[in-house]
Amino acid sequence: MSRRPNTSRRLMDAGSIPFVGSLHPKSRPSPFLSLGLVVVGALLIIGYLHSGSGGRAGLEAYNRLEGGVSCTLELQNALPVLKKAYGDSMHKILHVGPDTCSVVSTLLKEEDTEAWGIEPYDLDEADANCKSLVRKGIVRVADIKFPLPYRAKSFSLVVVSDAVDYLSPRYLNKTLPQLARVAADGLVILSGYPGQQRAKAPEMSKFGRPAKLRSSSWWIRFFVQTSLEENEAATKKFEQAAAKRSYKPACQVFHLKPLH
């Protein structure tokens, strides 16, 4: 994909814009003009986000506009590294997290890969592709605070992004063992780093509470308390594959063993 030359500085030069250059330095723009520009800008942003609804483009636009971090988007960046780390275990995957339709769609494009998804929250303005995945039963909307509708070891690998950051320890105690129960080879969790920015308004309306971004030491203690064992072999393979690709995850990545 060709890159366009950076013209932002030229566009910001008042002399290059006849209308702006003709204004007297002490003159003030009309309040109606300012309001109009704000409205037009907002409509353009909404339209751009809507055009990428249910897909990776929408997540990327959302992140740039809000200045936040999406671990679901980061998961898509990490997929090549996960494939190197898990090999054949990537053939039957369950993804759990917001915008799971985009992740499942990406996985289904891979050869010899089956993928399913659980959307823990309502699917707002889902695109045609996402609605099709729901109709086929590939993607489900389900509250992960309750038992998952799958048998033990139904999937080779379970991957969770963003979802656990919105659960209190009370529900994590039940949810994480459930996720590990339906995994045959492992459970991968992507969680935000403490201090990372998340958009507040969408959080409260969609998730019901702001994200609780916890440290790696907190998670490790929690895994021990809930009898979840870290998968050291998978962690090492992931780190080696990431180093070869010069890849540094924007989210914390934890590798856990399935429940026996």
Image: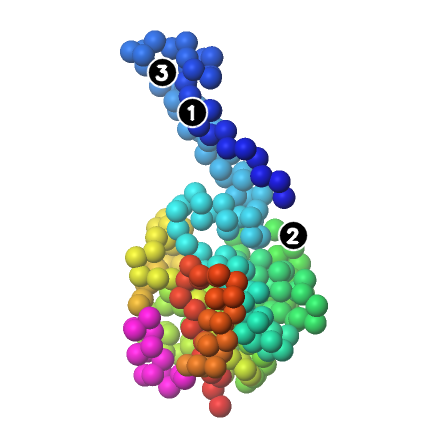
- At which x and y percent is residue 35? 39, 24
Please, which colouring scheme is shown? Answer: rainbow
Return the residue at label 3.
29
The kind of residue tagged 2 is Ala
Q: Which residues are magenta?
A: 216-229
- Residue found at x 31% / y 66%: 214
Disc 3 is placed on an element classified as loop
Q: Looking at the figure, which quarter contains the N terminus?
A: top right
- At which x and y percent is residue 123? 53, 56
The kind of residue tagged 1 is Met
Quarter of the figure with residue 172: bottom left
The kind of residue tagged 3 is Pro
Residue 11 at least partly seen: yes
Q: Residue most toward the right? A: 111
Disc 2 is placed on an element classified as helix
- Residue found at x 40% / y 66%: 252
Q: Which mark is residue 238?
A: none
Q: Is residue 73 magenta?
A: no
Return the residue at label 2.
128
**As displayed, is residue 178 above or below residue 167?**
below
Kindly report which numbered mark, 3 or 1, lies closer to the viewer in this rendering.
1
- At which x and y percent is residue 149? 54, 77
- Residue 197 versus residue 135: which sits nearer the camera? 197
Sequence-wise, which precedes: disc 2 or disc 3?
3
- Residue 143 versus residue 94: which sits nearer the camera? 94
Between marks 2 and 3, how big is the CA–CA gap? 43 Å
Main SS, magenta residues: helix
Label 3: how many Cα within 10 Å (few below 14, some 14–19, many 20+): few
Instruction: Left or right? Give the position of 107 relative to 69.
Output: right
Return the residue at label 1.
12
Residues under numbered marks 2 and 3 in contact, where contact means CB atoms less than 8 Å apart:
no
